Amino acid sequence: MHKLTLKELSLQLQARKISAAELATLFLDRIEASDLNAFLHVDRDLTLAQARAADARLAGNDAGPLTGIPIAHKDIFVTRGWRTTAGSRMLQNYVSPFDATVVEQFNNAGTVTLGKVNCDEFAMGSGNENSFYGPVKNPWDTLAVPGGSSGGSAAAVAARLAPAATATDTGGSIRQPSALCGVTGIKPTYGSVSRFGMIAFASSLDQGGPIGKTAEDCGLLLNAMTGFDERDSTSLQRPKEDFNRSLNDSLKGLRIGVPKEFFGAGLAADVEQAVRAALSEFEKLGATLVDISLPKTELSIPVYYVIAPAEASSNLSRFDGVRYGHRAADYKDLADMYKKSRAEGFGEEVKRRILVGSYVLSHGYYDAYYLQAQKIRRLIAQDFQRALEGPDRQCDVIMGPVAPTVAWDLGDKTNDPVANYLADIFTLSTSLAGLPGMSIPCGFGQGEKNGKRPVGLQIIGNYFDEARLLNVAHQFQQATDWHLREPA
Ligand code: GLN
């Protein structure tokens, strides 16, 4: 049962072959038996109450495609009744009085919350090692990182502890852990998924999305989690669409842009091999490969690591020990209370970003760093538009690796922030441009240690072209079985 896709599980539930309560129990038992540290909070009573409500809807013919489906939520989405920590000590005991819009949408669809999953502190990281609650192990090889920041989401789906999970992507945090854990994830166009109740990291980049086993499952989840929300000022007002409407379209004539900047020095040979093999598979499906150039790719790292910390330094100022969060036990006066509370509540990486962010926004440096980064951000977006937009466009989608290497060893990059930042080279530009991007499993790397290490193929599309990305991914998943492979 735990191997089934959402579509298959939904059929089982609707045919009453299994109840939502039984299904939830099955996954809760798997979670309890696991030692990956993927889940931060599990509460059987809360889960089973929701499952029983789903069973009532199933019995009353009031069920949709996700009613009774168990799901894990990244611990960055606030959830009423559950703790929400954002992977931080700062929010160790925080219980939100309301649900994030994404959580509310899933609750309305009848999904059953299995628990809250681990992530890098305030979603800052690429290996999930920045969580105050300890790293998550990669289910394929427990010596390896699962990727980040949505490492708990990706590991939970890969280990079949949950059939699907919510995640967020600011600079790659849906796509990169999906790649490193061999599962499927999509970050939609910026503004598609409400950020209300999603604890803010960098507001102009943060975007929620799903992680699942298949592209089709991701489409089902996107159908539930997108939509206009007046409580998010950057939420887009667009008609509801069925993201799975073109799954079965043929790929004959599809033009795939292959950016040369995604295949240069720094890309590991084993990753390149798996990605090139996937590209050949697409040729067999009728697509043609077009060489393209995204010349500003390299600049996405310095640009992102100016803009994201700048926004983070502002967003995180609300954690002052008064309105939210941890408060130090002993302090002399108000200023001392702020200092001690923030010093104790935030981890190293978060502090580093607050410092960098405050610096690049400060008088005298604003023009040199922040403003400059914003200008280059525009040029990065224009690179993509030249390739994907207008009558002279070169391609329909862009493909390349998600990450330059397979998952690295736990502990390998802990003391080297820049090494972590460099791992984001292929995901950041999509985020800076606000474009949709996804990751699908396409093979394994070499140098097996304690197990295989998966490789992900990245598929990037024009704004609002999610249905096409899912179509392209689905056709690949009909022709290959990488997405069905499971860790030992
Ligand atoms: N790894 C990137 C960072 O550390 C992206 C994180 C994210 O997408 N949330 O900021």
Image (spheres, rainbow, N blue to C red):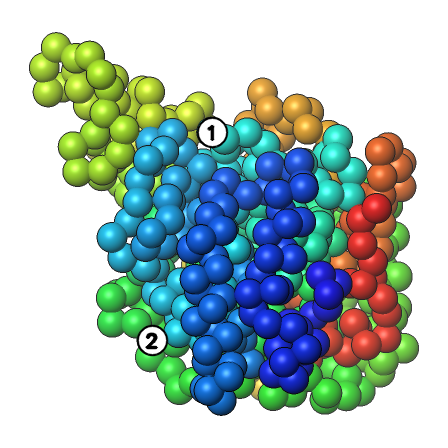
Answer above or below: position of 363 versus 462.
above
Picture coordinates of residue 354, whole percent (x, y): 34, 31
Instruction: Please state, as top left, top right, bottom left or bottom right, where the N terminus lies in the image.
Output: bottom right
Mark 2 residue element:
loop
Cβ at disc 1 under 8 Å from ligand 1: no
Mark 1 residue element:
loop
Q: Which mark is residue 228?
A: 2
Residue drawn 74% across and 53% down?
Answer: 182
- Farthest residue toward the left? 333
Q: Is residue 288 visible?
A: no
Is residue 148 or residue 165 the one in the foreground?
A: 165
Answer above or below: position of 2 versus 125.
below
The amino acid marked with disc number 2 is Phe
Q: Which residue is mark 1?
A: 132
Q: In this rendering, would 139 be left or right of 462?
A: right
Q: In this rendering, would 36 be left or right of 114?
A: right
The amino acid marked with disc number 1 is Phe
Q: Of tags 2 and 1, which is closer to the observer? A: 1
Q: CA distance from mark 2 to mark 1?
A: 33 Å
Residue drawn 55% across and 43% down?
Answer: 39
- For label 1, the crowd category at 10 Å Cα-Cα, with few meaning under 14, some 14 to 19 and many 20 or more, is many
